[in-house]
Image (tube, helix red, strand yellow):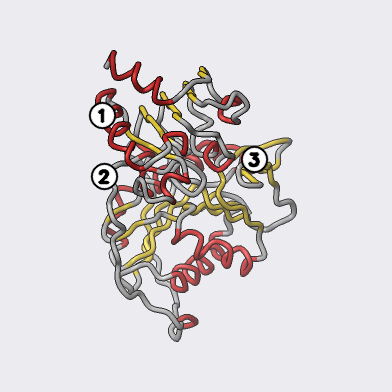
């Protein structure tokens, strides 16, 4: 077995950004794996995405038209099993998303393969494929191998790998799949329910001013929102602030919130630095932490730290902004 199969993700007529990121991750190890790089698109209008996934470095694009207009886990899993049994790739990459997770583990079991989820690092060590993911609530990084498995299935974390770009010259192939085995499946797509919009995108923000329990009360949120606006920052928060309803969940940075992927400057005000929060921001190049507790874990990752009252610090920023 050799080669890499990337499963493109799309929803409601739009290709997900992570599809190009999956291709980028595959290209970074393509020479080590050997064989070709194929991208498969499964959907009623699979052909619509032909040019978008035909990126530089892709050898083959497989289009699998199905009757279902919306994503269906049973249909996708059946189609992928058929393709993988025929193509015999060594590695299969999917998005670490609701759709990817609903397929990946079952796919690995059916194929007798290895499975690693939420991967943010991928490479080779002594000729063996190795994946990196976090464990114990983000406290440690774990390196995993799947020796002696005929195929390895991985879900990759979004906004982590550099997206592939440029026009490719891949072979285009339309594939028909026998979906009779899942014709009597028990679930069907109902409807999409839009999540309430918070008006912010923590994942794309380059400058974040984030607040925690140290701001003491919900009535202080407007002050810090105004400060963030004056500084040209996006207002973020820790989980206790979001759980208390002081700010919408869309502002939350951390394991159960959003990873500040593109952030270059992070100001943490009154945030102790629980591991769940650090998961979303400890990678940032410049972190400024303000907390009255000199032993707060946030200082372990901060570039600059100040043991002082957050309101005093905010007042100083207000005077110069």
Secondary structure under tag 1 reads: helix
Is the Cβ of the residue at disc 3 closer than 8 Å to that at disc 2? Answer: no
Q: Residue furthest top?
A: 320
Q: Residue at x 45, y 68 (%)?
A: 76
Residue at mark 3 to residue at mark 2: CA–CA distance: 30 Å
Instruction: Say which label, 1 or 2, has the lower sequence index.
Output: 2
Vertical comparison of 288 with 34: above or below: above
For mark 2, what is the residue? 199
Vertical comparison of 317 with 98: above or below: above
Secondary structure under tag 2 reads: loop
Q: Residue furthest bottom?
A: 184
- Could you say which is closer to the camera, residue 224 or residue 63? 224
Q: Residue at x 57, y 46 (%)?
A: 119
Residue at mark 1 to residue at mark 2: CA–CA distance: 13 Å
Question: Does residue 142 appear anywhere in the picture?
Answer: yes
Q: Residue at x 32, y 31 (%)?
A: 224
Question: Does residue 54 appear anywhere in the picture?
Answer: no
- Could you say which is closer to the camera, residue 205 or residue 118? 205
Residue at mark 3 to residue at mark 1: CA–CA distance: 32 Å
Mark 1 or 2: in front is 1
Tag shown at residue 229: 1
Q: In which quadrant is the C terminus drawn? A: top left
Secondary structure under tag 3 reads: loop
For mark 3, what is the residue? 139
Is the Cβ of the residue at disc 3 closer than 8 Å to that at disc 1? Answer: no
Instruction: Say which label, 3 or 1, has the lower sequence index.
Output: 3
Where in the figure is residue 33, as x and y percent of width and height? Answer: 61, 43
Where in the figure is residue 165, as x and y percent of width and height? Answer: 36, 37
């Amino acid at each position: 077995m050799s080669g890499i199969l990337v499963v493109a993700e799309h929803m409601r007529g739009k290709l997900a950004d992570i599809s190009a990121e999956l291709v980028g991750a595959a290209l970074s190890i393509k020479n080590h794996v050997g064989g070709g790089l194929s991208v498969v698109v499964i959907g009623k209008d699979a052909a619509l995405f032909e040019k978008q996934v035909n990126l530089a470095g892709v050898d083959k694009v497989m289009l699998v038209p199905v009757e279902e207009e919306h994503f269906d886990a049973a249909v996708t899993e059946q189609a992928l099993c058929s393709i993988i049994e025929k193509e015999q790739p060594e590695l299969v990459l999917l998005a670490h998303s609701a759709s990817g997770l609903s397929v990946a583990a079952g796919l690995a079991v059916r194929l007798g393969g290895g499975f690693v989820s939420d991967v943010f690092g991928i490479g080779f060590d002594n000729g063996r494929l190795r994946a990196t993911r976090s464990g114990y609530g983000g406290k440690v990084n774990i390196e995993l191998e799947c020796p002696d498995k005929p195929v390895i299935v991985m879900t990759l974390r979004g906004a982590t790998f550099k997206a592939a770009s440029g026009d490719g010259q891949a072979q285009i192939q339309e594939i028909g799949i026998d979906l009779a085995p899942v014709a009597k499946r028990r679930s069907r797509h109902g409807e999409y329910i839009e999540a309430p919009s918070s008006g912010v995108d923590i994942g794309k923000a380059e400058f974040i001013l984030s607040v925690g329990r140290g701001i003491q009360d919900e009535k202080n949120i407007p002050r810090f929102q105004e400060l963030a606006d004056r500084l040209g920052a996006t207002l973020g928060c820790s989980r206790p602030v979001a759980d208390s309803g002081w700010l919408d969940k869309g502002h939350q940075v951390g394991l159960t919130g959003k990873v500040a992927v593109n952030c270059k400057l992070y100001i943490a005000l009154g945030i102790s630095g629980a591991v769940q929060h650090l998961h979303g921001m400890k990678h940032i190049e410049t972190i400024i932490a303000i907390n009255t507790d000199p032993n707060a874990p946030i200082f372990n990752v901060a570039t600059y730290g100040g043991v002082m009252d957050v309101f005093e610090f905010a007042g100083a920023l207000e005077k110069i902004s």
